[in-house]
């Protein structure tokens, strides 16, 4: 019973494998170093497979005796008719860090900035900016050789000769018997001669598995010839059930180590969010389960051919029929993704054009397989590379050429290229997550993205700009307030000047006002003598007349009067005393008979009953207010 | 602890708390700039600038009100007729107009067909007493007139009435008659400014 030695992960991977578009190999001169990935970048599963298919050492062979252990290795020797350029013989491409992952220190700051800007506006997003993981393999860190990034221009010198298309002349497979030490190099046609015994399986050999060095592979003498045929789509793989599985529980240290690695991986892995169910399923299928069990017993070692490639083929639609988003919308999504990635802490993958075309691709049935030809050629291809579009074209002349022994191996580095250099296939699924990470702890190096530094610098610049703006604004505001105060002071000064112009007017008005007040006061105290004479006329008897008068404004009046007789003087006195409303006091004095008047009086007395005139003085004290009233 | 692990931890912290670090840095820069440059300026503006501005604006407002009042006063002063001002100056002449007052008195006596026998005036600069308003610059002048020709009581009476009407600011303080000389002595008081 054949036993399928492939682990579950590989089975699932093969099951979910989708054929990629095969492109013909065209050798355009020396292969650039960038396209060849170093072997140290092999992931954990690839290393596992490498060990699985690797020939055990002699010591381990003694311990574990596997009957009919056959390990084959294919060595492809491709010769080119014309060597386009001299290539160094020994070139180690084990660069610890690819060039695209690091920013060259020789670049100037302006070049770095321009590289960053161009990366933003470029179509494809630079996903290589993930934090790099160092892999030291089985060596400790201190013993691990330190490699510096080497530029391809240094490795391969530019050729002056125009590159010409190379041709594949022949492919030889080299087998070496175990223990004999003799290399058995035979052409394929000789190995697969017995056509009477059709091979029941296909031997899949991956191109990436050959060891770094050209090893001598030991093959037992009792090895039966194996018939290798092209993988047939209609041939169903025979998968033998596992007999028993022994569950191996991981230790606490392993669990802790696993969780630590997962956490670190989550930090530095930018998960792409599946946009539809199809992608989600694809991502789920890409995650390989943890190999928990191994076969307990290996009764026989038979290589089971892997299941055929899925009978689907991705056919890309024509560009004209694509109805995806426009370039502008994709560019906008990129910008939006960058902005949201800054604030969300996760970078979301933005679908590129290739992804869009992938979504729009259709699954079409694979074309009919080729007819089985005679075993004139060994086609050791990986299932992923198997298919109708193989890069080896058979020619009628090659059939004849295959029958003759192959030419001697060319001198390395001159006539051809040795394709047995260890190299790895590029990861088909970037979202693949391994449950077991064999990267040592010391190899983890957390790098801060240059874009983050730039963003931080940008924000710092913006903050400084805002601060400067605030300072400028405050200074402007202060100057504005000061200017306003100056304006108000200027207006006050002008108002004072205008007020000063009114000083003369104010003085004139004040003087006028004072004059008016004084005049009003004086007019109110004006003296009218006419009232006095009216009073005297009123309070004087007809027998009395005044001969002299002295009066003043205080109300004192002194009158010299003459009366007809003595009685008239008495009557006048009585009248003065009766006019108390006007005359406050009145006195009559010095009543004397006049001389002339006395003689007449004496004559009248002598003549019986003749009155004599009298003179008298009257002093009056009248109310002074009578001078204030006009007539 | 190795330097590499320290760098790794720092980078890890930086990546994980990038937004917080950026926010803190921005806040620190903005806060520091505010405390160093903006705060003092704003405090000075609020405490000194705006207060001074309000005060100056109040002063300016008062000046404007004063100017408005002066403008109104000027309009009133301009509205006063010149005749009234001349009349006022007639009733209250200035010191320089005293000689003209004497001439006017003489003319008045002559108009009444009387004879000015004598005229005496007292010293200038007698300030007005309680009768005048406070703060006035009005002064008084005593004048003594000796008049002949008043031969009747009615003539004396008319003369005094006319003098009171036409020369209102000639106050007759005392009147005396001497029959021997036939002269009326009039003690007058006039005012000037």
Image (spheres, coloured by chain):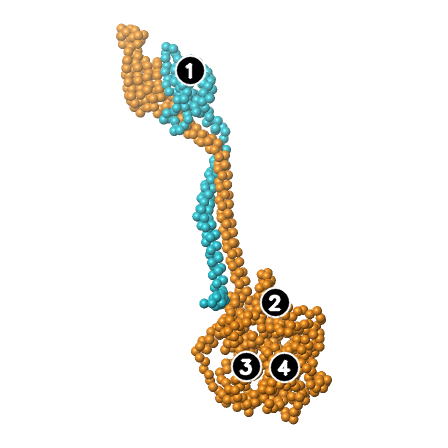
Chain colours: A orange, B cyan
Residue at mark 4 shares a chain with residue at mark 2: yes
The subunit carrying tag 4 is A
Residue at mark 3 shares a chain with residue at mark 2: yes
Expressed as whole percent of the image width and height from the top left, the position of residue B119 reads 42, 15
Instruction: Specify the farthest residue to the bottom.
Output: A196
Q: Residue at x 53, y 69 (%)?
A: A131
Q: Within 10 angstroms of label 1, few (less than 14), some, or many (20 or more) residues?
A: some
What residue is disc 2 on? Answer: A122
Residue at mark 3 shares a chain with residue at mark 1: no
**How far is disc 3 from disc 2 in space, using C-alphas?**
40 Å
Q: Earlier in the sequence, mark 3 or mark 2?
A: 3
**How far is disc 4 from disc 3 in space, using C-alphas?**
18 Å
Q: Nearer the viewer, residue B63 or A357?
A: A357
Residue A13, image quadrant? bottom right
- Which mark identifies residue A75? 4
Q: Earlier in the sequence, mark 4 or mark 2?
A: 4
Instruction: Specify the farthest residue to the right.
Output: A397
Q: Is residue B157 visible?
A: no
Q: Within 10 angstroms of label 2, few (less than 14), some, or many (20 or more) residues?
A: few
What residue is disc 1 on? Answer: B119
The secondary structure type at the circle numbered 1 is strand
Q: Are marks 3 and 1 in contact (CB under 8 Å)?
A: no
Picture layout, residue A592 above or below residue A3: above
Q: Quadrant of the C terminus of chain A?
A: top left
Q: Residue at x 30, y 14 (%)?
A: A616
Q: Are marks 1 and 2 in contact (CB under 8 Å)?
A: no
In this view, the mark in front (1 or 2) = 2
What residue is disc 3 on? Answer: A51
Q: Within 10 angstroms of label 4, few (less than 14), some, or many (20 or more) residues?
A: some
Q: Earlier in the sequence, mark 4 or mark 3?
A: 3
Q: Nearer the viewer, residue B95 or B53?
A: B53
């Amino acid at each position: 019973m054949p036993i399928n030695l492939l682990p579950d992960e590989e089975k699932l991977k093969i099951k979910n494998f989708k054929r990629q578009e095969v492109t013909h190999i065209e050798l355009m001169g020396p292969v650039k170093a960038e396209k060849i990935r170093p072997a140290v970048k092999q992931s954990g599963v690839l290393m596992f497979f490498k060990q699985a298919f690797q020939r055990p050492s002699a010591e381990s062979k003694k311990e574990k005796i596997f009957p009919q252990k056959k390990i084959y290795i294919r060595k492809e020797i491709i010769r080119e008719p014309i060597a386009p350029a001299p290539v160094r013989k020994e070139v180690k491409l084990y660069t610890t860090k690819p060039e695209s992952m690091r920013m060259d220190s020789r670049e100037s700051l302006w070049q770095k900035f321009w590289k960053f800007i161009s990366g933003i506006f470029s179509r494809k997003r630079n996903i290589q900016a993930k934090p790099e993981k160092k892999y030291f393999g089985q060596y400790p860190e201190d013993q691990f050789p330190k490699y510096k990034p080497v530029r391809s221009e240094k490795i391969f010198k530019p050729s002056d000769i125009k590159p010409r298309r190379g041709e594949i002349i022949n492919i030889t497979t080299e087998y070496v018997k175990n223990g004999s030490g003799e290399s058995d190099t035979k052409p394929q046609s000789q190995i697969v001669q017995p056509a009477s015994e059709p091979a029941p399986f296909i031997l899949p050999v991956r191109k990436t598995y050959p060891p770094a060095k050209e090893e001598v592979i030991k093959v037992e003498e009792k090895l039966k010839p194996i018939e290798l045929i092209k993988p047939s789509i209609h041939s169903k793989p025979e998968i033998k059930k596992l007999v028993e599985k022994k569950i191996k529980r991981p230790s606490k240290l392993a669990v802790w180590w696993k969780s630590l690695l997962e956490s670190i991986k989550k930090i530095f892995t930018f998960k792409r969010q599946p946009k539809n169910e199809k992608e989600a399923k694809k991502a789920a299928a890409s995650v390989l389960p943890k190999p928990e069990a191994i076969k307990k017993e290996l009764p026989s070692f038979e290589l089971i051919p892997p299941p055929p490639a899925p009978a689907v083929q991705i056919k890309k639609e024509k560009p004209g029929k694509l109805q995806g988003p426009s370039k502008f919308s994709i560019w906008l999504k990129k910008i939006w993704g960058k902005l949201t990635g800054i604030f969300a802490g996760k970078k979301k993958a933005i679908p590129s054009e290739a992804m869009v075309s992938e979504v729009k691709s259709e699954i079409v049935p694979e074309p009919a397989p080729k007819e089985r030809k005679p075993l004139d050629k060994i086609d050791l291809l990986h299932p992923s590379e198997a298919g109708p579009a193989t890069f080896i074209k058979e020619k009628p002349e090659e059939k004849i050429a295959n029958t003759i022994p192959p030419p001697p191996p060319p001198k390395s580095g001159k006539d051809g290229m040795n394709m047995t250099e260890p190299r790895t296939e590029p990861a088909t699924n970037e979202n693949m997550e391994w449950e077991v990470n064999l990267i040592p702890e010391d190899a983890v190096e957390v790098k801060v993205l240059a874009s983050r530094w730039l963003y931080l610098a940008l924000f710092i610049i913006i903050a400084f700009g805002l601060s400067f703006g605030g300072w400028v604004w405050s200074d402007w505001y202060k100057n504005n307030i000061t200017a306003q105060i100056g304006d108000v002071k200027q207006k006050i000064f002008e108002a004072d000047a205008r007020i000063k112009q009114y000083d003369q007017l104010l003085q004139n008005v004040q003087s006028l006002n004072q004059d008016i007040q004084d005049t009003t006061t004086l007019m109110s105290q004006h003296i009218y003598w006419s009232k006095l004479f009216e009073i005297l006329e009123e309070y004087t008897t007809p027998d009395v007349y005044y001969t002299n008068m002295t009066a003043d404004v205080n109300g004192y009046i002194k009158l010299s009067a003459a009366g007809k007789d003595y009685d008239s003087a008495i009557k006048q006195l009585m009248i003065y005393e009766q006019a108390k409303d006007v005359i406050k006091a009145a006195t009559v004095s010095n009543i004397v008979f006049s001389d002339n008047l006395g003689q007449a009086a004496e004559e009248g007395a002598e003549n019986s009953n003749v009155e004599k005139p009298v003179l008298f003085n009257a002093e009056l004290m009248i109310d002074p207010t009578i001078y204030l009233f006009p007539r | 602890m190795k330097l590499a692990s320290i760098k790794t931890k720092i980078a890890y912290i930086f990546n994980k708390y990038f937004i917080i670090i950026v926010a803190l840095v921005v806040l620190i820069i903005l806060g520091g700039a505010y405390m160093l440059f903006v705060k003092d300026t704003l405090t000075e503006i609020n405490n000194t600038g705006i207060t001074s501005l309000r005060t100056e604006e109040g002063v300016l407002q008062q000046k404007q009100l004063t100017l408005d009042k002066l403008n109104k006063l000027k309009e009133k002063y301009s509205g006063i007729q010149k005749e009234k001002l001349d009349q006022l100056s007639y009733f209250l002449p200035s010191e320089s107009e005293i000689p003209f007052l004497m001439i006017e008195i003489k003319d008045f006596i002559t108009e009444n067909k009387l004879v000015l026998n004598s005229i005496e005036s007292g010293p200038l600069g007698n300030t007005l007493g309680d009768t005048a308003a406070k703060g006035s610059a009005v002064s008084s002048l005593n004048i003594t007139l000796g008049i002949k020709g008043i031969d009747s009581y009615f003539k004396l009476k008319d003369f005094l009435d006319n003098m009171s009407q036409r020369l209102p600011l000639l106050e007759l303080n005392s009147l005396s008659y001497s029959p021997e000389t036939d002269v009326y002595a009039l003690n007058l008081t006039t005012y000037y400014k």
